[in-house]
Amino acid sequence: MSVHVGAGLSTDSDPRLAALEAASTASAGLDGADADLVMVFASGSTLAAPEAVLEGVHETLAPRTMVGCGAVGVLGGGREVEAGTAVCVWAASLNGGTAHSFHATMHSVEGGAAVEGLPDLDGAAAAVLLPDPHSFPTDPVLDVLHEQAPSVPLLGGVASARTADGGGALFHEEEVVDGGAVGVRLDDVEVLPCVSQGAAPIGPELTVTAADGNEISELAGEPALSRLRAVLEDLDSEERKLVANGLLIGIVLDAGKPEYLRGDFLVRPLLGADPETETVAVGAPVAPGQVVRLHARDADSADEDLREALGLRRTALGGEAPAGSLVFTCNGRGTAMFGSPDHDALTLARELAGAPAAGFFAAGEIGPVGGQSFLHGYTATLAIFPS
């Protein structure tokens, strides 16, 4: 028996009926097997009664483990509902693998704050994390989890909607919880991470020769700002069009390769520059010796990057279609980026041979680059489950 995945989406205005419909569709993909893990994402008016959504899912699937969150939009079945009312249900039978849910919260303590409820991830296959943006310190928690279990990929997305009364909309088993983060530890199941950062590299690779924290003072032995200006002056016309949408910088985290590909760079914003000191501030710590390269984002590069990333995963799977995938895509993508609906959902269906895929439009996406998981923006991040 192999891993089975099912996904369903409903836009019924009644929260319970929407959950029943989406869960029934997801159940059909399990081929009669039990639902070891269910993920639920709800948007629009369903968040006026999220408890009804959870009741409908439990009634239909009786999941061993279930987590989820509120979202501005959801996707599934080759379709994206970017705004309005919808329920998306993703279900998996893990073929002997296990999923253990958790609810982590932050509490004030003398001299600072502490997070309680995070699992020990040592030895896990992977973990999924769904934080509330207002009450959970996602970036520092990711750093701590990486230190504790550096080989475990962390994937997920930041909840992008709240309940109708303004409370947190995180789903943990049969309860709606207000704040913190929910998630699952996965064991004895293969998970293939995929992070498409949606940006195209431009100009040459440059070595950082002097830096402090997130400020670069020298690139290739020259003042950082002067060197970047020279790079921009040498761009061709097509690259200049890309730069018009804003500059980003890619930072290589896993050095030593003979050639760096698009996915080897952690893409972060350029935060500013000081003309007097000729330093450049970037959105991540940088150290001397690291390689960086300018990047730019537009719809064409985001499309190409996603197709390329998915193609590499299909190659890793020997050309076979996966059982399915969980999807965390940025709420800045969709029609706003691509000019037409359903881009990411249709691309996944095409590139992954129709394998069930479902997820939500997140307020930040969590996934690994260079062996460490980060909180991203404008990415399409997936947890792919081989069959």
Image (tube, rainbow, N blue to C red):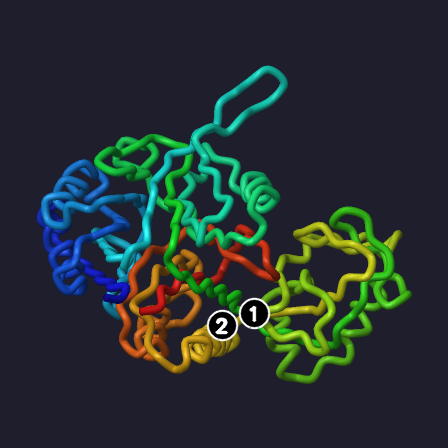
**How many residues crowd mark 2 within 10 Å: few (<14), some (14–19), many (20+)?**
many
What's the residue at 86%, 56% (across, down)?
A: 210
Q: Which mark is residue 302?
A: 2
Identify the image quadrant of the C terminus. Answer: bottom left
What's the residue at 41%, 80% (across, down)?
A: 318
Residue 298 in percent (x, y) is at 52, 72
- 160 displayed left or right of 207: left
- 365 displayed left or right of 48: right
User: What's the residue type where badge 1 is placed?
Assistant: Ala
Q: Residue furthest top?
A: 110
Identify the image quadrant of the N terminus. Answer: bottom left
User: What's the residue type where badge 2 is placed?
Assistant: Ala
Q: Which element carries disc 2, helix, strand or loop?
A: helix
Residue 288 in percent (x, y) is at 82, 57
The picture quadrant where one finds residue 51 is top left
Tell which of 304 and 231 is nearer to you.
304
Q: Earlier in the sequence, mark 2 or mark 1?
A: 1
The picture quadrant where one finds residue 291 is bottom right
Whether residue 61 is situated above or below residue 205 in the rendered picture: above
Q: Which mark is residue 175?
A: none
Q: Are the two marked residues, 2 and 1, in contact with CB atoms closer than 8 angstroms?
A: yes
Q: CA distance from mark 2 to mark 1?
A: 6 Å
* Mark 1, residue position: 199
Tell which of 132 and 274 is nearer to you.
132
Whether residue 358 is situated above or below residue 35 in the rendered picture: below
What's the residue at 58%, 70% (across, down)?
A: 263
- 74 displayed left or right of 306: left
Residue 231 in percent (x, y) is at 78, 74
Whether residue 234 is situated above or below residue 86 in the rendered picture: below
Q: Which element carries disc 1, helix, strand or loop?
A: loop
